[in-house]
Image: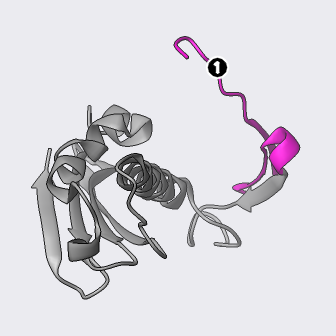
Amino acid sequence: MSNQATVVNLKLVEGYKFEVDFGDFGTITTDEPEPLGSGSGPSPSQLLAAAVANCMAASLMFAVRKYKGDPGQMRAQVTATTDRVDGRLRVTHLDVDLRLGNPAIELPQLDKILAQFEDFCVVTQSVRQGIEVTAKVHDSTGMGVRSSTK
């Protein structure tokens, strides 16, 4: 699976609004927030945050299932922090909160899963080259089962 190319096409609609074409998967509209754009769609920073959280949630689900567990109704929330770096606005931190849909006690090999699932997330590991990403995992009871900063 190495050297795979992903192609996404963008077309300016107006102002800072773009139509993003994912081919067979359809299109979405993105836009910068006010005052630059009109905020009529997710911003590039929101797409980045969503990509990291989605990839991390999928990696956790894969790992749980690999050990014959049921992740239940997975949920994720991601908070992107922006700050000025050398005078320019940058995404400086992504904080991902993953919520498993079942209690930790029902998930076999959870310690092994939590120790390795992040390493398989292509997007997160790529983004971590320049942005700090923290991850917390909670089970369905709300109990924290892992917290990390890499």
Report the residue at 35% width, 36% height from top.
120
In this view, which residue lies farthest toward the bottom? Answer: 141
Provide the residue designation for mark 1.
Answer: 5
In the image, residue 2 lies at what x, y percent? 52, 13
Report the residue at 50% width, 51% height from top.
51
In the image, residue 9 lies at what x, y percent? 78, 36
User: Which element carries disc 1, helix, strand or loop?
Assistant: loop
Front one among 93 and 33: 93
Drawn side of residue 6 relative to residue 57, left or right: right
Q: Mark yes or no: residue 61 visible.
A: yes
Q: Which quadrant is home to the N terminus?
A: top right
In this view, which residue lies farthest toward the top? Answer: 3
Image quarter for residue 111? bottom left
Drawn side of residue 138 relative to residue 121, left or right: left
Front one among 21 and 113: 113
Image quarter for residue 147? bottom left
Compared to 69, does 23 lie above or below?
A: above
- Which segment is the magenta one? 1-25
Report the residue at 22% width, 41% height from top.
116
In the image, residue 121 lies at what x, y percent? 38, 40
Q: Is residue 114 magenta?
A: no
Q: Mark yes or no: residue 14 visible.
A: no
Q: Residues within 10 Å of mark 1 (few under 14, many from 20)?
A: few
In the image, residue 88 lies at what x, y percent? 32, 47
